Amino acid sequence: MTNEEKLLRDGLTALNLPTDDDKVAKLLAFVALIEKWNKTYNLTAIRRRDEMVNLHLLDSVSILPHLEGKRMIDVGTGAGLPSIPLSIFCPDIEFQLLDSNAKKTRFVQQAILELKLPNVKVTHSRVEDFEPEKLFDTVLTRAFASLSEIVELTQHLISENGTLLCMKGQTPEEELAAANAQTTLISINVPHIEAERCLVKIKK
């Protein structure tokens, strides 16, 4: 077993998530794809596979218990985070990934094909220009913008009783104060990561 696989399996166990071989293989294949494309597409500043396991895979799936509904949109998905790792665990949830960077959406499209993820779609668009045919139960963002900007930019995407989930590092006190919305702060513990992580939940 490689070091990355051990890190991943240990981390998933700590998060009380399944460690079946199929899921582990897909997650590690995703990291290998990021590493391969990173050389020309500059998808992420993280270069080492073990760090990708912790900072990309485990960080993404740590929010799994807080997903609501059957339709998600990941705004500013970048290299497909957090939604590609989440989609591997949630085959019955429909994920729409959105990014305005064409290189990144090309990579995500390739990852969807190679990992055989029928529940994931990617669209190259700015969030303000994207008009969905059907609204989403949950809007996900990871390091996309400030809370008040996110609330403003994503209102047209969220269904009536939908939820906005924003992944943040340290508690964004100033952003919480500035956001004109009722927020719930959830502390997130990511295995192998010392840094503070939190999830800001906003109900529409």
Image (cartoon, rainbow, N blue to C red):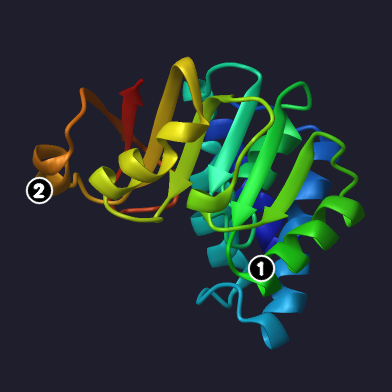
**Disc 2 residue type?**
Glu
Task: Determine if residue 48 is in view.
Answer: yes
How many numbered discs sit on the rendered protein? 2
Q: Position of residue 155 (x, y in %)?
A: 41, 33
Task: Determine if residue 191 is in view.
Answer: no
Which quarter of the image is occupied by the N terminus?
bottom right
- Residue 74 lies in quadrant: top right
Q: Position of residue 96 (x, y in %)?
A: 68, 40
Q: Which residue lies at the image location 58% right of the left edge and 64% below the top edge?
A: 100
Residue corresponding to mark 1: 104
Pointer 2 or 1: first along the chain:
1
Instruction: Point out which mark residue 174 bears.
Output: 2
Q: Which residue lies at the image location 68% right of the left edge and 71% below the top edge?
A: 102
Q: Nearer the viewer, residue 162 or 83?
A: 162
Q: Which residue lies at the image location 67% right of the left edge and 61% below the top edge?
A: 3
Which quarter of the image is occupied by the C terminus?
top left
Q: At numbered mark 1, what does the secondary structure look like: helix, strand or loop? A: helix
